[in-house]
Image (spheres, helix red, strand yellow):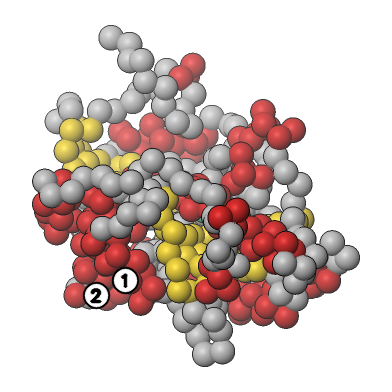
Amino acid sequence: MTSPIWHPFHQHGLGEPIPRVVRAEGAVLHLADGGTLIDGISSWWVTTHGHCHPRIAAAIAEQAGRLDQLIFAGYTHEPAEEVARGLIDLAPRAAGRDPLTHVFYSDSGSTAVEVALKMALGYWHNLALDGLAPPRHRILVLEHGYHGDTIGTMSVGERGVYNQAWSPLLFDVGTIPFPAPGREQRTLDSLEAACAAPEKPAAFIVEPLILGAGGMLIYPAHVLRDMAAICARHDVLFIADEVMTGWGRTGTLFACEQAGVVPDIMAVAKGITGGAIPLAATLATARIFDAHKSTDRARLFYHSSSYTANAIACAAAAANLAIWREEDVPGRIANLSDGIAARLARLADRPAFAHARQLGAIAAIDLNAPDAGYLSDLAPRLRAFFLARGLLLRPLGNTIYLMPPYCLDTDQLDQVFAVLADAGERFGVRS
Ligand SMILES: *Cc1c(COP(=O)(O)O)cnc(C)c1O
């Protein structure tokens, strides 16, 4: 029986199997054929505490029977208010930096980033209307960045085969080289020069501490701190895309905390509901909000989607925030990180692997394989191997990474690393 479904990031022409999942619990997916899989990548980086967390599931059920959805232009509801207050409470803060004070809701990481870009450009537009500053339109980005798959977010992301079809439509940006080990100063110099250029940039957007889809590329907190400081000195808005890094993945609730950075605008999504239901938020400082606040209707922030601040999604996010406040989530993440570190070190010694790296509960290692390009058939063969061994992983080219839910236990971790070792034997070079 053929399905009418067109799957994302899936080449239907290759006839790869599409497993049917009927149930999930904790870190485990139950398949229609009776098998199980360990969800090694949190179902695309969203599931934080584990699948079907009872508190979040209960909050969703309760809210669904009370108020499901409400137009959010000019109306409000308690779950949205509660989550907004919670986000502002938990957001990164630092002495001498304007705090994040306002929360704009949307429904995916891509829309949260689109909103961030529109806020930054709207800020400069409105300042220019008042004659307070010349208009600014240019966005700076970090090499290898990923911010989503809409036209705007592709524009600020790395260009490649995955967005070639639309490249004529993508807007021009200034690209700052990735701060690879030993080349951090080049990144900072390049950013300094771009900020001081005659065409002043409106904003610089970064994934803090680790670039996800770009290959799990990690850079030091001091570089993040210095990049934010350069932007502050040149009055270039600093946008942190915490869509992947947020909600504990890097070891702290938000990655910016590790660098003492408070961005002007911050995008969050993925784990905001614990991964149960779509919701996103873009946080901004008062000056961004104030630039749009006026008695002039033309100044309002023109962005909305039908499900903005959906009440059921907000109730799930409120339950997630309560879990963060009331349970020792950082302790759980620290345990998981330690467990990963010990096992990753053993794997890293094998000739089949290179570049073992870890940040919090995210680990990655490159497979030394004969043909390892993004379009080689290595990734699908690895996927099939992992599937057959009861593990859901989705390598990025020859980069195998783990981003499990925080409830993954020691036995499951052992299982995962046993399969990784076998994958090295099967697909990697031997010496
Ligand atoms: C996943 C991701 C996005 C896009 O989020 P979606 O919810 O998939 O639209 C944006 N930025 C980063 C850093 C991401 O990892």
| 322 vs 372: above or below | below
Name the one closer to the observer, 268 or 428. Answer: 268
Residue 265: quarter of image = bottom right
The amino acid at mark 2 is: Arg
- Return the mark for residue 337: none
Along the horizontal axis of the image, is 282 left or right of 406?
A: right
Residue at coordinates 66% horizontally, 45% vertically from top-left? Answer: 155
N-terminal-most mark, 1 or 2: 1
Q: Tell me whether the residue at label 1 lies in contact with that at label 2, contact meaning CB atoms closer than 8 angstroms.
A: yes
C-alpha distance separating marks 1 and 2 = 9 Å
Q: Is residue 194 left or right of residue 241?
A: right
In this picture, is 6 found above or below 237? above
Give the foreground label among 1 and 2.
1
48 vs 131: above or below: above
Residue 336, located in which quarter of the rendered image? Answer: bottom left
Q: Nearer the viewer, residue 47 or 396?
A: 47
At 15% from the left and 55% from the top, the residue drawn is: 59
**Residue at numbered disc 1:** 86
Identify the residue shown where x is 61% and y is 35%: 162
Q: Position of residue 353 (x, y in %)?
A: 52, 53
Identified by mark 1, the residue type is: Gly
- Residue 425's quadrant in the figure? top left
User: What residue would you read off at disc 2?
Assistant: 325
The one nearer the camera, 428 or 154, is 154
Residue at 45% from the left image edge and 31% from the top image edge: 8
**Which structural element holds mark 1?**
helix
